[in-house]
Amino acid sequence: MKESNMDGLQTTATETEQQLEDMAKEMRLANDGLLEQDKGYFCDVRPHRVEPYKGIMESFANWARSQSLWILGFGTGCGAIELRPLMTSRFDMYRYGIQARPTPRQSCVFIIGGYASVKTLKRIVRSYEQMQGPKFVLGLGSCTVNGGMYWDSYNTINRIDQYIPVDVYIAGCMPRPEALLGGFIKLKQMIREGKCEGMNKYIDDFDWYKANQKQIIHDWNMPDYNW
């Protein structure tokens, strides 16, 4: 019986080692083993600044961008409740060229509605980095400005712009749908004027943003580059 048990334990240990080896292969970064000149095509490479077009081409591109805003709503608390009325016939956000999308890859406007906690900051960072550029951020509600009623909480981020760039803040607790539409109109104006360079600001100050993020996110178990 003892020999049989030992054989069983040995078999289990072998299976466990094989499973760990398989997991290590599956979790390997995409550019492992590639030539140095090919590594830039994969998501774990440091981001590079994207320079705007020149002259009328950039003006036309900004006009087109402002007319087609696809939003990713990140509702961390009560703030997200004001996004729903915008989709109804009373406010009809679609007439402004605003459309909700389900994933970061499909979106260009990131709306953070409500307080940001230490636990959700990791998801905010990953969602923002996975959005394709150019991308813009709306901070919805007082909690994103200064923490709101949770400003002295041990688990609340008081200023979200210390961790990702924010283009427009919409203050209030909670701001009405009309205020949110006003924020969108302001964002559209800034895009047309070429003033929404948050993506390049994030790239230029990448080390500063990463240092701030890692001060809060202690269980950092993801790549620094999530593109």
Image (cartoon, rainbow, N blue to C red):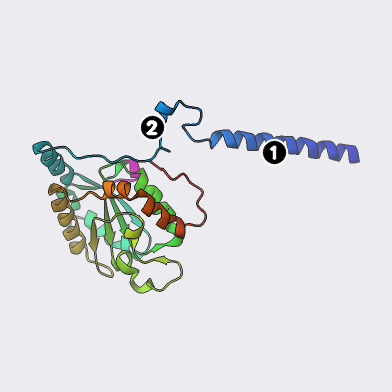
> How dense is the environment of label 2, judged by Cα within 10 Å: few (below 14), some, or many (20 and up)?
few
Point out which mark residue 16 bears: 1
In the picture, residue 20 is in which quadrant? top right
Task: Tell me if label 1 and label 2 are in contact, CB under 8 Å.
Answer: no
Image quarter hosting the C terminus:
top left
In the picture, residue 138 is in which quadrant? bottom left
Helix, strand or loop status at disc 1: helix
**Magenta-tinted stretch:** 100-105
Residue 112 position, x and y percent, is 32, 57
Q: Vertical placement of 28 versus 89: above or below?
A: above
Front residue (pair 85, 105): 105
Q: Is residue 187 visible?
A: yes
The amino acid type found where label 2 is placed reads Gly
Residue 125 position, x and y percent, is 39, 51
| Tag in front: 1 or 2 | 2
Front residue (pair 62, 88): 62
| Residue displayed at 15% across by 55% down | 185
Residue 224 position, x and y percent, is 44, 45
Point out which mark residue 40 bears: 2
| Residue displayed at 15% across by 52% down | 190
> How dense is the environment of label 1, judged by Cα within 10 Å: few (below 14), some, or many (20 and up)?
few
Image quarter hosting the N terminus:
top right
Q: Is residue 123 left or right of residue 53?
A: right
| Residue displayed at 18% across by 43% down | 65
